[in-house]
Amino acid sequence: MKNSAFNNILLLTTAFIWGAGFAGQRAGMEFIEPVTFNCVRSFLGAFSLLLLIIIFKIKKGPNKKMNKWEERRYMLKAGILCGLALFFASNIQQMGMVYTSASKAGFISSLYIIIVPMISIFLGRKFPPTLWLGIILGAFGLYFLCAVDGFSNIGYGDILIMISAVLYSIHILVIDHYAPKIDSVKLSCVQFFVVGLISLIPMFIFENPTIEGIIACKWALLFTGVVSCGIAYTLQIIAQKNTNPALASLILSFESVFAVLTGYLILHEVLTMKEILGCILMFAAVLIAQIKRRDTASKCC
């Protein structure tokens, strides 16, 4: 079996960084507007990955059949499509962070782990029957987490985070299509540049970015840009090279738990008992969705 304690620690560290990133995203909204935040952190993530590519001299992707120019054309196409999907997903999520807590956002966002296989049905992939249990638990968890006083009081921010979870699922499937043929670090670098460039347009049209606001938000931007995008992504790549994908995704799902812990410790967010029950149900749904995929994953490895 290709698992080790060291790789598991790297994945758990990645989950912690991503979970803490929700607190950083929420804290950043105190200084600058959503698209501005996402634009700056995307460029920071892109440049940190570019530095990584230069340092480790990553030259050729995994597809040796492509020549230099074919790889570049394919990389540009893949980067633009992945970047477009990530642009809509990340910006809608960031807008939702204005109106909801980091804790709730972390758990709602984790629904992509259930949504991805659901979307895969329409792509002709097998649908594990036990996934329905995860879907049902996730639905009840969402109700307790978001509909505090009934469906009429589901927050605007919660709805935006739900939409972003669907869009992140689409983004994951787009990456799943292109990533096997090219270097994943390069692809991530290109997609972050695309997100940053596209975000410049709505940022200057609909928002009022200021240097003062960006400087005031520097720690949140550096963490979510360099640490969440650059360092955490690199740790994930290193760890997953020698880790069963089912176990890897299971460990990474602890991101939602760390989102609650850091939201409490950093932002002093407190969940009600009903919201805690929602978190438990949603986390159980995520675990079931991952564990039941282990058989499928082991057959492919």
Image: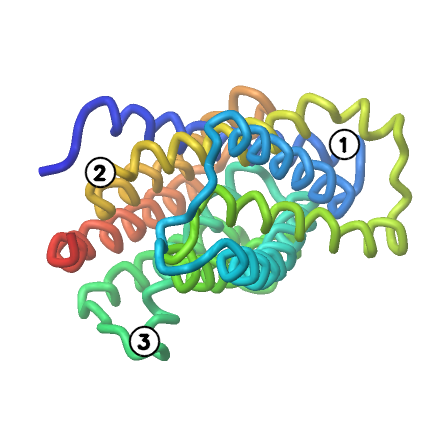
Instruction: Where is residue 111? Give x, y as percent.
Output: 41, 55
SS class of the residue under badge 3? helix
Instruction: Where is residue 173? Give x, y as percent.
Output: 42, 63
Between 3 and 219, the one lying in front of the other is 3
Q: Which residue is drawn at 39% across and 30% down?
A: 235
Asked whether disc 3 touches disc 1, contact meaning CB atoms under 8 Å apart, the reply is no
User: At label 1, which amino acid type do we have?
Assistant: Glu
* Quarter location, residue 241: top left
Q: Name the residue under label 1.
A: 30
Label 2 neighbour load within 10 Å: few <14, some 14-19, many 20+: some
User: At label 3, which amino acid type do we have?
Assistant: Ile
Q: Which residue is drawn at 18% across and 64% down?
A: 130
Q: Which residue is drawn at 52% across and 51% down?
A: 148
80 sits to left or right of 234: right
Q: How far apart are marks 1 and 2 (CA)?
A: 39 Å
Query: Residue 121 — which label?
Result: 3
Query: Residue 243 — which label?
Result: 2
SS class of the residue under badge 2? loop
